[in-house]
Structures are given as C-alpha cells and as structure tokens.
Image (spheres, grey):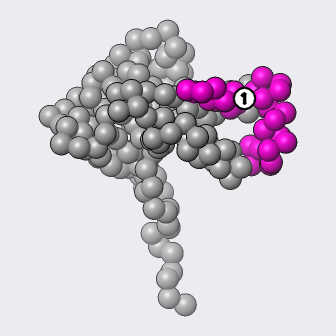
C-alpha cells in the first residue's frame, strides 16, 4: 500500500514522525509543524522559500530547509512501509544517565520486526554506521564511544531497517519534573 511519510531531520538523524495515505495530508502536517516551530510565519514566507530554492513540493515528495541550508522536514512517497501488525510492533526504550546529582532520560520510540532482538539490532546498526566515512569524525570526537544518544541522533533509518528496526516519533505525552509539587 502506498504511503507518504513525514520525516523530521535533526542533523544526520532522520526520524519518521507520521504516515499518511495522501501527499496532501503529509504536506499539511509538515506545514503545520513548520508554523508551530516558527520556521515560517505564513504562506507568503513559504512562497519565498520555494522561490529561493529552500523548499520544494513535488507530487510524490517534498522538503523544506532552514536559513542555514539544512533540510529539517521532508516527505517521502514509499510503497512498502511496514505497518504495525502481527509482523511489527512498537517499542519504547528509556535510556537513563545519572551523575549522582541529576538524572537524564532519553526516550526512543522504535518500530521493531517480530523476532528481532532489539539490543543486537541497535548494536549492529551502530557498528555499521561507525564504519561509514560520515561517522569517522563523530566517532573520533566521542573518544571512540557510541551510546544510545548517539544512536538516536546519528544512525539513519536506512541502516536501522537492515536490522529490523525503525526509529519513529510518537506521542509520548509530556515531560515533568519528578519532584514537582502537585498540591499547594
């Protein structure tokens, strides 16, 4: 079944945010996100981006980039998108770091093919990515360490999919401070 996928681009990481049945619905969602994030203020600014070559809305794909030239959102037309069904399921991973004073949680939302060991798949994807020319400087600047945060930020879905996983964005609720006082 044909689908249109809205992808958020953050540096080298591409995160599938939502799937749509029509290109028009995906474009509307992308424009809504751009407006919400303040990337564009109105349709006139969008027309300027298109005129200046900083956005494109083709019949099967679309993209928009920021003033610094980086693509931040794109839409892809795909024919074989895995859907959550008896072969795929959604898995939430919480990576936690604590230095004794502060705790940081990173939430990673994955679509996982049934039968795939998530830990092995993530490690294999990271190992493959770390062998690419694109990753050499990143890996070196990280003192030859690569953790869950690096996986989430850098490893593209094009590598993840080879191992039966896809990074997706999900509606994970809201972030709260654990010790926030709820009764005054």
Residue drawn at x 61%, y 35% is 73
Horizontally, residue 105 falls left or right of residue 30, namely left
Q: Which residue is mark 1?
A: 55
State the image coordinates of residue 62 (x, y, percent, origin top left). 62, 29
**Segment colored magenta:** 37-65
Tell me which corner region of the image, top left, top right, bottom left or bottom right, holds residue 64: top right
Q: Which image quarter holds the C terminus?
A: bottom right
Quadrant in the picture for residue 113: top left
Q: Can residue 53 be seen in this snapshot?
A: yes
Pick the quarter of the image with the N terminus.
top left
In the depicted structure, whether residue 51 falls above or below residue 148: above
Q: Is residue 74 left or right of residue 81?
A: right
Query: As displayed, is residue 73 above or below residue 162?
Result: below
Q: Position of residue 158 (x, y in %)?
A: 41, 22
Residue 63: x percent and y percent? 64, 29
Q: Nearer the viewer, residue 17 or 135?
A: 17
Specify whether residue 48 is painted magenta: yes
Q: Is residue 114 within the magenta segment?
A: no
Residue 122 appears at what percent x and percent y?
A: 31, 30
Q: Would residue 68 appear left or right of 146 to someone viewing this image? A: right
Residue at (49%, 83%) from the top-left corner? 182
């Amino acid at each position: 079944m044909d689908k249109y996928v809205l992808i958020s681009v953050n540096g080298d990481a591409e995160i599938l945010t939502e799937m749509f049945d029509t290109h028009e619905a995906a474009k509307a969602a992308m424009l809504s996100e751009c407006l919400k994030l303040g990337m564009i203020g109105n349709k006139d600014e969008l027309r300027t981006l298109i005129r200046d070559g900083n956005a494109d809305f083709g019949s099967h794909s679309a993209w928009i980039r920021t003033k610094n030239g980086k693509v931040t959102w794109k839409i892809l037309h795909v024919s074989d998108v895995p859907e959550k069904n008896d072969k795929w399921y959604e898995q939430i991973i919480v990576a936690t770091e604590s230095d004794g004073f502060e705790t940081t949680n990173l939430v990673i939302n994955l679509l996982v093919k049934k039968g795939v060991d998530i830990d092995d798949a993530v490690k294999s994807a990271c190992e493959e990515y770390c062998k690419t020319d694109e990753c050499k400087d990143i890996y070196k600047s990280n003192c030859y360490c690569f953790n869950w945060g690096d996986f989430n930020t850098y490893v593209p879905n094009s590598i993840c999919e080879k191992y039966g996983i896809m990074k997706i964005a999900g509606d994970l609720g809201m972030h709260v401070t654990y010790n926030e006082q709820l009764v005054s």
